[in-house]
Image (cartoon, helix red, strand yellow):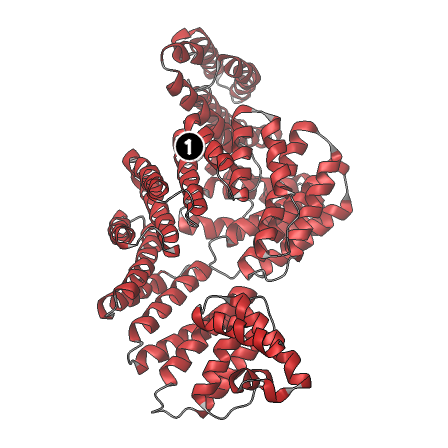
Amino acid sequence: MLRLLADVHLARYQADMDDGDAINHAMTLYRHLLRGQPDLVPEGPRQLLEQHSDRPGELFTLARLAYDRFLAGAEEDLETALGLNRRALALAGPEDDTRPQLVNGLCALLCSRYERTGSQPDLDAAIDAARSAVALGGPGLPLYLSNLGVSLRDRYFATGRLADLDESVNCASRAVRDTEYPDDQASYETMLALSLRARGEATADVRDLDRAIDLLTGVVTRTPLELREAGTRLLNLQSLLTSRYVMTRNSEDLDRIVTLAAGRVAGLGTDSPMRPGAVAGHAQALRTRYDWTGDPADLHDAVASLRAAPDADEALLADLLRRRHVRFGNVADLDAAIATLEAPREPSPAAADMLSRLSMALLDRLVVRGVAADADRAVEAARSAVAMPHLNHTDRLSYLNSLTGALSTRADLRRSAADLYEAIEVMRTVVAHTPAGHRYQAVRMGNLAHLLVKRNDRASLDEAVTLATEAAAIELRRTRTEAWWFRRWLGETHAARHRMTASRYDLEAAISAYRAATRDEAASAPNRMESAKAWLALAAGDRDWPEALDAAVAAVELLPRLAWRGLARPDKERMLRREAEQLSADAAAAALHAGHPQAAVTLVERGRTVQWSQLLDARGDLASLRAVAPELADRLSHVAAMMAEAGGAKPIHR
C-alpha cells in the first residue's frame, strides 16, 4: 500500500512538474520504504535518496528532483541539488550533449541560493554559468539567453550597474528572435519587456517603456484567459502602464489599466478557478488609479468587489481598508483590516507578509487610539514575520526593516533604551546585508542614521553623520526625487552633533544641508518649510543674521505654496495661524538684526498678505467647489491629504 501511494504521488508529479507537493509526498513515502523494504523503491527515487550514480544524465535528473523538493519546502535539498549538478558537470566531458543543460541548471540553482541568502558571489557565479551555457549553444540556446538576461537584471537591482541592463535587454532580444515555439516566445517577450522597463525607469527613457508595453500587449492578447500565466502577464502590463503614466502623466494609461483588468473579469465564468485572481487584479487596478487621481469611487469599488468575491485576496483587502481609513478617518476600516490580517495561518512566506502588514496596521491604530498594547502586538507580529520559514533574502530584509520601525515606535512610546538598542542592531544587520549599489542602500543607511541620532551619544552621532553623508552622496548621484530627504537628515545629524560638541564644522554643514533641502524643488512645500525653519533657527542661534535673513526670506516665499487651494478652510486657517504669524515675526527679527529695517516691514507685510488673501478668497474654499463639482472636490482633498502625509519628516522604510 505504501508503494502504491508513493507511485501515485510520483505519477502526479510526472503529469505536472510544477506540483511540488506531489514529489515531496512521494519521496517521503519512498524514504520510509527504503528503511524497511528497499527492493520496493524504484531506481530513480532510490538514487536520489542514496545520492549515487556515475552518469551525468541520471545525476541531472536527480538534481531536478531534489530541486523540486526544495521548492516544496525542503530547504536542505537545495544544497543536495547543487552537489548533484556539480558532480554531473565533473563527469560530463566537453562534448557531452548534456553539458549545456547542466551548466544552465547550475545557473538556476545558484540564482535560487542567491534569492535565499543574498550572496553576491552566488549571483556572479550564476551569471558566469549562464554565459558558459550560451557559449555552448544547442537547442536550448533561447532558454539560456533568457536566463542570462534575468540574472543580469537581478544584478542590476542589486548593484545599480546599467551595463548589466543593456546586456539583459540584448540577451532577451536574442531569445525572442531565436525561439521556434510560440509558447516560449511569449515567455521570452515578457522577460524582454521587464528588462526594457527596468532600463526605461533607470534612464527615464519612455521609448523603452513604449516598446515594453507594445510587447506585453501582444503577449496578453494572445494568452487565453483561463491560463495561469494570463493573470501574471496582465499584472505586468498594468505595472508597465503605471510606470509610463508616472513618466508622462497621460491619464489614458490609468484608464487602460482598469479597462484591461475589468475585461479579464468579464471574460471569465463565475466558477472559473482563475476568477479570484482576476478580481484581485481588477481591485489592484482600481487602487492604482485611486492612488494617482484620488477618486474615492475607485477605492470604494475595489473594497466592494473583494468583499463580494469568494476566496478574496485578504492582503489586498486589508491594504485597501487601511487606505480608506487614511482617507476618511473611519477607524472601523482599520479594525477590519487588522481582523483580516491577524487570522491564523500555516507558516509560509505568505503568512510572513500578512504578519508584516499586521504590524504596520497596528502602528497606524496606535497613532489613532493611543493604546500601548498595539505597540506590543506590532513588535510581536513583526518578529513572527521575520521568524517564518522559507523566506527569500529580499523579503527577510524587508521584514527586518519593518521590525525596526515597530521597535523604534515602542521605544519612543515607553522611552525604552532596550527597544532602541535592538532597533539599531536589527537595522545594522539590514544595512550590512544590502550590497553596494542596491536601490535601497541609501534609504537603509539613512534609517540607521535616524535611529542613531535618537540614542544621542557621541559615538552614535559620529556614526550617524558618516552614514547620512554616504547616503546623501549615493542618492545625489542618482538625482532621484527623494534627495531632499537625505539632505534634510544630513542636516539633522550634523545639527545633533553640533548641539553636543558646539563644533563649527557641524554647524556650517547642517546649515548647508538645510539650505539645499529648502531650495530643492522636487520636495513638497511642507518639507521645504521644515528645512527652512531649521536653517533659520541654526543661523539665528549662531547670530549669523545675514544667513538667517536668507533663510527667513526663503521660508516666507514658501507660504503661498503651503496654503494652497486644495486645503479645506479650517485646515488652511490653522496652518496660517501656526506658520505665518510666527514666521513673519522671526523673519522680521532676523532682518532687523541684519540691519535691514525695510526688509523687516516687507517680510511682515508679505506674511500678512498671504494670510488674508488665502482666508478671504471664498472661491478657493472646498465647500464652494463641492457644491458644483463634488467629485473634483474629493480629488483635490485627496491630493491635499497625500501632500500632507508626504510632508512628514519620518524616514522612508523599505
- Taking the spot 37% from the left edge, 41% from the top edge, the residue there is 265
Vertically, is 326 above or below 389? Answer: above
Residue 525 is situated, as x and y percent measured from the top left of the image, at 46, 28
Residue 142 is situated, as x and y percent measured from the top left of the image, at 29, 71
**Left or right: 248, with 616 as reference point:** left
Pointer 1: residues within 10 angstroms few (<14), some, or many (20+)? many
- Taking the spot 35% from the left edge, 60% from the top edge, the residue there is 162
- Taking the spot 46% from the left edge, 20% from the top edge, the residue there is 559
> Amino acid type of disc 1?
Tyr
Vertically, is 298 above or below 581? Answer: below
How many discs appear?
A: 1
Q: As drawn, which residue projects farthest toward the front?
A: 1
- SS at badge 1: helix
Residue 190 is situated, as x and y percent measured from the top left of the image, at 32, 58
**Left or right: 326, with 519 as reference point:** right
Residue closer to the observer: 498 or 435: 435
- Taking the spot 47% from the left edge, 19% from the top edge, the residue there is 567
**Left or right: 531, with 417 as reference point:** left
Residue 368 is situated, as x and y percent measured from the top left of the image, at 65, 28
Q: Is residue 501 visible?
A: no
Residue 377 in which image quadrant = top right
Vertically, is 2 above or below 224? Answer: below
Query: Quarter of the image containing the N terminus?
Result: bottom right
**Which residue carries the number 1 mark?**
290
Residue closer to the observer: 188 or 473: 188
Q: Is residue 98 visible?
A: yes
Vertically, is 160 above or below 551? Answer: below
Residue closer to the observer: 156 or 213: 213
